[in-house]
Amino acid sequence: MSTDAIGILRRRFPGLVFWYGRHTGSWWALIPPPAGWRLVEALDPDELTRAVLQCASWPWPPT
C-alpha cells in the first residue's frame, strides 16, 4: 500500500474519499455522481483514477 498514492489521489480529486483496503487488497473511493454517493473498488491507483474520471458511466467497470 502506498500512502503517497492516496495523497496524490486526494490532491487530484479534493473532497473525495480514498483508501486502500488491507483486508481486501483493493483500492477504494467514495464518489458523488449525480445519482448519489457510490463506492468504487479498483485493483490499483491507476484503475481507481480511471473510475473517478469516468464516474458518469455506471456501473464500474463498464461492461
Image (spheres, grey):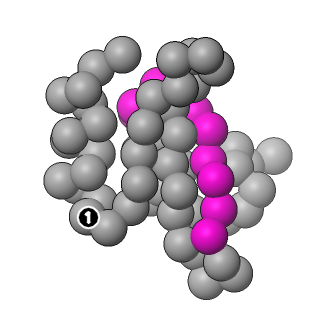
Element on which disc 1 rests: loop
Residue 52: percent from left, percent from top: 47, 55
Q: Is residue 55 visible to us here?
A: yes
Q: Is residue 59 left or right of residue 14?
A: right
Q: Which residues fall within the magenta stretch?
A: 37-47
Residue 6: percent from left, percent from top: 29, 36
Circle 1 packing at 10 Å, graded few (<14), some (14-19), many (20+), is: few
Give 41 or 57, whichever is nearer the viewer: 41
Q: Quadrant of residue 1?
A: top left
* Residue at x-position 41% and y-position 45%: 18
Residue at the far bottom: name it.
Answer: 34
Q: Is residue 56 visible to us here?
A: no
28 inside magenta stretch: no
* Residue at x-position 53% and y-position 56%: 30
40 inside magenta stretch: yes
Count of marks placed on residues? 1
